[in-house]
Image (cartoon, rainbow, N blue to C red):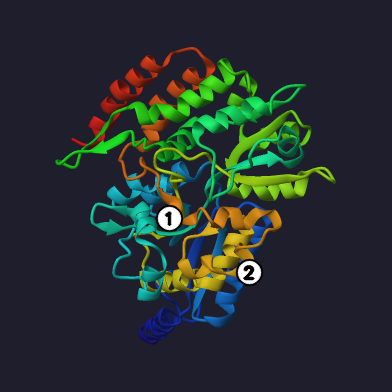
Amino acid sequence: MRTRLLTVLAVLGMLLTACTDGDGGAHGVITLRFQSLAWQQDSVTANKQLVKEWNASHPGIKVEYVQGSWDSVHDQLLTSFEGGEAPDIIHDASDDLADFAYGGYLADLRGSLPSRLKSDIPRRSWKAATFGDGVYGVPFLQEPRVLVANSRLLKASGVRVATPDRPWSWDEFRSVARRLSGKGTYGVAWPLKEPVSATLNLSLSAGGRLFHRGADGKVTVRFGDADAVVPRTVRDTVATDHSASGTTLGMGGSDTLPGFFGGKYAMVPLGFSYRQQIAQQAPKGFDWQVLPAPAGADGLTQGVSPQTLSIAEDSPHKKEAAAFLDFLLRPRNMVRLALGDWMLPTGTQALRDPALHTAKNDWATGTALADRLSPAPAQSMRGYPEWKDKVATPAFQEYYSGAIGLRELRERLERDGNLVLARYQR
């Protein structure tokens, strides 16, 4: 009797094993966890709808949507990696990937992605997710920094309106900001609560690089004249020209919108995706438009940190995860994600979609800047998060507020910055 019972239990065990995959999915169904950082309602809707469409057409591979947050993603991912609980598919930004890639937490995607996807995204965008010899994410959405301007105030001032074909230089921008100032209005607001990314990415237009990789592969910080163009412009508009409000230096982009709508600020440099908030929140009759950021010695070039999709190295279903990425990033689906986030797709086919070239909400202005977007100079550098938080952010904040001068800014970025980088490059 006991032998018969053991035999029955063994058979039942084999049947149960045959009906489940390694992750406990029923009837052989593979389950992939997709952590998305979408937060705007249109974007969340687009992502969830695409997951629903995938699940309807792939009954053997179920994708589970997991909501993440930009505010805590780095620490949350680090904890999940170290605890062996990372999602299979990871939404992040390219400037957050270096430590995860070098740490062995992300899968190298070079042999996993279809040729269609690899050829559709430009090489310059792939560089944003390339660390060492591997590719650890698919860059799929990006946004330029632009100037959002009060159209009525622009017209009343008589200034030449910048276009992608004829942008303002940094000197002309400073002159325009002065012309737009007066009678309770500042020409520009600088929302620089998080000053590092905005400063470094805009500095590429002036030829600023800040980070320089030597023949030995090691990176050092050198703050030259070109790197000083954008910081000096910000400081001078606040302290010398009084065409910018110093109180906005501690604000985030959304914090400046009430003053922008009320005519207190004529222009605000913002990411392209802020158009959604402006379109939704602007008072009835408020007329606004998007202008390109100022151009320097290198024209309209600016740095971006594209949003990325990666696969965890510990995922037991990398092949299936790569297939989902291919589906999610088909040209039409990439357009849907871009429209949902009010950003630009990296894919060349998606960028040609007529929906991204309309005059409404100035989509065409942003799309015209797409081929001038380059990987942010800092993102391939190990130790960037620590460098940004401990060295660059306080140094730029103190410089912009007037607490230190340009010489001390340079010394702190170079001296303290190189000490941080050296620890990661031993």
Residue beneath disc 2: 49
Q: Is residue 74 above or below residue 153?
A: below
Residue 356 appears at what percent x and percent y?
60, 63
Circle 1 SS class: loop
* In this rendering, position of residue 332 left or right of residue 231: right
Q: Is residue 126 above or below residue 350?
A: above
Quarter occupied by the C terminus: top left
Residue 367 appears at what percent x and percent y?
55, 57
Q: CA distance from mark 1 to mark 2?
A: 23 Å
Q: Type of residue at label 2?
A: Gln
Q: Callout 2: 10 Å neighbours few (<14), some, many (20+)?
A: few
Give 163 or 131, whichever is nearer the viewer: 163
Determine the residue located farthest toward the right in the rendered image: 284
Give 368 or 156, whichever is nearer the viewer: 156
Residue beneath disc 1: 86
* In this rendering, position of residue 201 left or right of residue 105: right
- The mark that comes first in sequence, 1 or 2, is 2
| Picture quadrant where residue 22 is located | bottom left
